[in-house]
Structures are given as C-alpha cells and as structure tokens.
Image (cartoon, helix red, strand yellow):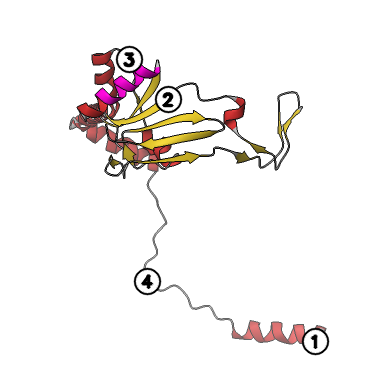
Amino acid sequence: MVLAALWLTAVVDTQAKDLGVHGDLFPITEPDILMVIRARLTALGKAGEIDRLNFEFRDRAVASIKRPQAPAGIRHTDVPRQWFFDPTITVGEDLRDNEGRLIHAAGTRVNPLEIMGLTQKILFIDGDDTDQVEWALTQRREAGRAKIVLVGGAPLELMENHKIPFYFDQRGLLTSRFQITQVPASIEQIGSLLSISEVKP
C-alpha cells in the first residue's frame, strides 16, 4: 500500500509542468456597491427624478386607499345560490394559554362559532353599483346592524356619503375563504354553521 502511494506520487511529480504565463493579467476589481448606489441617487436627485418618483409613489398610495384593487373573479349575481359553511377546524398541535394550561389538545375539532358567534350579518357588494349599495343599506336597517364589505368601489367616499363604516375585502381574503363569486351576497350564522347567500337585489 505504501509502495503504491509512493509510486503514484512519483508519477504525478514527473508529469507536472510549469506552463508559464500567457496573455495579459489584470487585477480583479469590483466597484463598491454603496458608491454605485450613492452616485446613482445623486444623479437622479440632480435630474429631479427622485421628487418625481416620490410624487408618483404618493399618488399611487392615495389612489389605492381611495379605491382599493378589486378581488378577481367576482361578478354580479346571475344565478342566485345559497349554501352552508362549516368553520370547524382540527387543532394541529396542543394550544396552551400564557401560563401553560391546555386549552385544546392536538386533534381536537373546534367550531369558532361555538366560542364566539357571528353577532351581525356580513354583506358583500360592489360599491360602484348603486342598486347594490341601496340593497345593503336596506338590509342593514332591517337587521338593526350589519357590516358592509366592498369588493369594488370607493369605501371612503361611501363612508362620507352615508355616515356609516364600509369595509373592503383586501386581496379577496374573505370572498375566497367563503367561496363567494357573485355579489350582492350575505353571511349570517344559523346554529353552528354560516349561511351564505348570493342574491339579486
């Protein structure tokens, strides 16, 4: 084994050659990224681009507050439908309070409506449709109270006009969770389930 290692070393040593240097060599240099950014910002500042970009950013932010982006795939109700939604979940791991006491063991099925019920209707409408706005206002008056959630339109303008809160389904989180694809729609609690209806006003 030792002889084989010595023989291999000798072969490698005899085959190694110094091939010299061919062509020009240059040092590896890389610009300081912070210096590049600073220079670019200075150039943009002198050209007035930073102010322009700031104004554009501000205008986009104000526009998105006044009229948030509507969730995709929501249309006006064509074929009314009604279904029930069971919000029961299965706890994935032990849930404990801040003192370590067990609230729910892993594998327990929990229905949030049995812990805290839905105390008022939730109404989903397109705020740009005056018929749907009137429908929601009527529903709210008849129910005593209800939350109106927009899937389109200008919530601040509607709040100013009607002096009541209007909410917006940001990124379609609620409509996708409850599989709502048509508006106007309503959600209310019946027993331990949610009754969801897509209606024509």
Place of residue 191 in the rendered image (x, y in percent of width and height, measured from the top left)? 55, 30
**Label 4: few (<14), some or many (≥20) within 10 Å?**
few
Dividing the picture into quarters, in which one does residue 138 lie? top left
Q: Secondary structure at mark 3?
A: loop
Q: Secondary structure at mark 4?
A: loop
* Camera-nearest label, 4 or 2: 2
Mark 3, residue position: 164
* Camera-nearest label, 3 or 4: 3
* Camera-nearest label, 1 or 2: 2
**Label 2: few (<14), some or many (≥20) within 10 Å?**
some
Spatial CA distance of label 3 from label 2 is 15 Å
Place of residue 146 in the rendered image (x, y in percent of width and height, measured from the top left)? 40, 21
Q: Are marks 1 and 2 in contact (CB under 8 Å)?
A: no
Spatial CA distance of label 1 from label 2 is 89 Å
Place of residue 36 in the rendered image (x, y in percent of width and height, measured from the top left)? 33, 41
Mark 4, residue position: 23
Please name the amino acid that badge 4 sits on: Gly
Read off the magenta span. 134-143
Q: Do we see residue 27 in this rendering? A: yes
Figure check: 4 above or below 27: below
- Residue 120 relative to residue 4: left or right: left
Judged from this view, the residue extending furthest toward the top is 163
Q: Residue at x 64, y 83 (%)?
A: 12
Q: Secondary structure at mark 1?
A: helix
Please name the amino acid that badge 1 sits on: Leu
Q: Earlier in the sequence, mark 1 or mark 3?
A: 1
Spatial CA distance of label 4 from label 2 is 80 Å
Q: Secondary structure at mark 2?
A: strand
Q: Residue at x 34, y 43 (%)?
A: 181
